[in-house]
Amino acid sequence: MKDFKKYFIIAAPPADVYLALTIESTIELWSGDKAEMSATPGSEFSLWDGSIVGKNIEFEKGKRIVQQWYFGDQPEPSIVTIKLHPHGEEETSVELRHTNIPDEDYEDIVDGWTHTYFGAIQEFYEE
């Protein structure tokens, strides 16, 4: 199992980035795919039409999201923590930490976070 941590700068305030991560219709706009999401602890979620699935654990509006991502019959949960910090006047510094990533999925997960997930959000707000 491996862990991944990275920071991203998004050209939008934390409140907007939080909504982009928690509102189905906004997720579908920046991802271009079907999403099921609720900002309710204990709710299940599905992104990219089921390519990513898991459970929402905690929410702190505008500041933090904690999720459990499912990887088959993995014995320990894979936990994603996203923290949003103001950066300058109208930007957000996103602190991403993803723990317990199965070794065989690590490279795909890192690439996905960097290019597909937060890369798409960065592009969405730059337009």
Image (spheres, grey):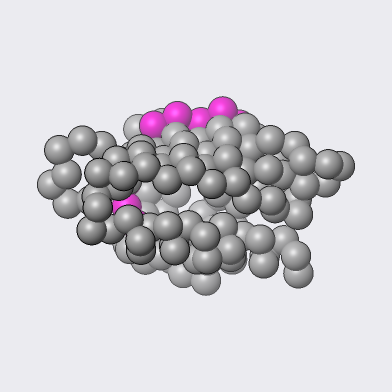
Q: Is residue 41 magenta?
A: no
For the question of whether residue 40 can be seen, the reply is: no
Q: Is residue 66 above or below residue 13?
A: above
Residue 101 in the image: state x and y as whole percent.
30, 47
Where on the picture, by quarter, is residue 2?
Answer: top left
Which residue is pictured at 35% across the width and 63% down the height? 108
Residue 67 in the image: state x and y as whole percent.
40, 38
The answer to which of 59 and 72 lies nearer the viewer is 72
Which residue is pictured at 75% across the width and 50% down the height? 12
Q: Is residue 54 magenta?
A: yes
The answer to which of 8 and 65 lies nearer the viewer is 8
Tag count: 0
For the question of whether residue 9 can be seen, the reply is: yes
| Magenta segment main secondary structure | strand
The answer to which of 65 and 102 lies nearer the viewer is 102
Which residue is pictured at 52% across the width and 66% down the height? 115
Where on the picture, by quarter, is residue 66?
Answer: top left
Quadrant (top left/top right/bottom left/bottom right) for the N terminus: top left
Q: Is residue 63 above or below residue 107?
A: above
Q: Residue furthest right?
A: 89
The answer to which of 123 and 100 lies nearer the viewer is 100
Residue 100 in the image: state x and y as whole percent.
29, 41
Tell me: 82 left or right of 87.
Answer: left
Magenta highlight range: 52-61
Which residue is pictured at 76% across the width and 69% down the height? 127
